Amino acid sequence: MNLKTMPNNIKRRLIIIANTGGEKNYCPSVIEDRKNYLDFFKSPEGGYWFNSEIIAPDVNSWTKEKLAAVMDEQEEDGRVNYWLIVFAGHGWENSEGHPFLELYPNSPAKEDLPVDWLEDRVKHSSCLLIADCCRNIYPLTESIGDSRARVKIFAREGSLGYSTKCRLLYNQQLKHLYPGLFVVGAAASFKEGAKNMPSEEGGLYSYYLLDCADKEIEKYQKLNEEDKTLAFSYIHSLAKPRVIRFSRDKQHPELWSERGAQPPFCVIPQWRI
């Protein structure tokens, strides 16, 4: 473990990769996931990410070469301290349990992104990877369940002062992270499929991550007792049993992480109007 923490001037980047799978394995919920994550992370409580810090082109537009080039370009004027990478789409694992992300529809296996490659690429930074995809040896897409309410869209607009305080709280938590920290929130366990919410409402895991974050934000806003920063690991722990229950025990999200400081997922400042 590298105990050197981040500098005071945090450089952070958010990359959102979405692959609908194309005509043969179409997964429309990915489009909703991409929109919901963008709305959430741009919101004050999601960290108030600036547009200049976000790389989220249209769905089905990534390749390994493009991802590598984008990451290199973002570091031309200095290393990125914190990468937040969201993947929504199709994935798989080989027989040895190494996960791969399918970056564009119907890509050959050799063109898919090994998570091991990504971990090595960001080894001088801190990184959170949210991977809402299957981990079957062969990809599987399946929708389940009855209709449910759409996850709340994070279009909250606060005053500039409120949004700025949220961003400062978020960055304060990032300062506690260390280079080489690589945290993965995986939607499913080995050999499991990642299921979708009905009515194209997004992936089951993504839906409950954002839904649990929304409920925690509302709870602490009502209390309004102190500044709160909620780690991704905490929100994952809330979402996991809901995913298991709604999937009828067929999908079990996993968190891959070292102990110690954890990336933030949302912040709730004490605020007096």
Image (cartoon, rainbow, N blue to C red):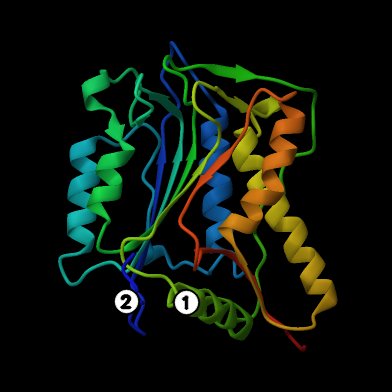
Residue 140's label in the rendered image is none
Dot 1 or dot 2: first in sequence order is 2
Q: Residue at x 67, y 65 (%)?
A: 156
Quadrant the C terminus occupies: bottom right
- Nearer the observer: mark 1 or 2; the answer is 2
Element type at marker 1?
A: helix
Q: Residue farthest to the bottom? A: 272
Q: Residue farthest to the top? A: 24
Q: Amino acid at mark 2?
A: Lys
Q: Residue at x 65, y 41 (%)?
A: 207
Element type at marker 2?
A: loop
Residue toward you, 194 or 218: 194
Q: Residue at x 57, y 55 (%)?
A: 39
Residue 171 % position (x, y): 47, 76
| Disc 1: which residue | 171
| Disc 2: which residue | 4
Residue 51 % position (x, y): 41, 63
- On screen, residue 215 versus residue 99, left or right, reads right
Whole-number angstrom distance, CA of label 1 to CA of label 2? 16 Å
Q: Residue at x 71, y 25 (%)?
A: 249
Q: Are marks 1 and 2 in contact (CB under 8 Å)?
A: no
Q: Amino acid at mark 1?
A: Asn
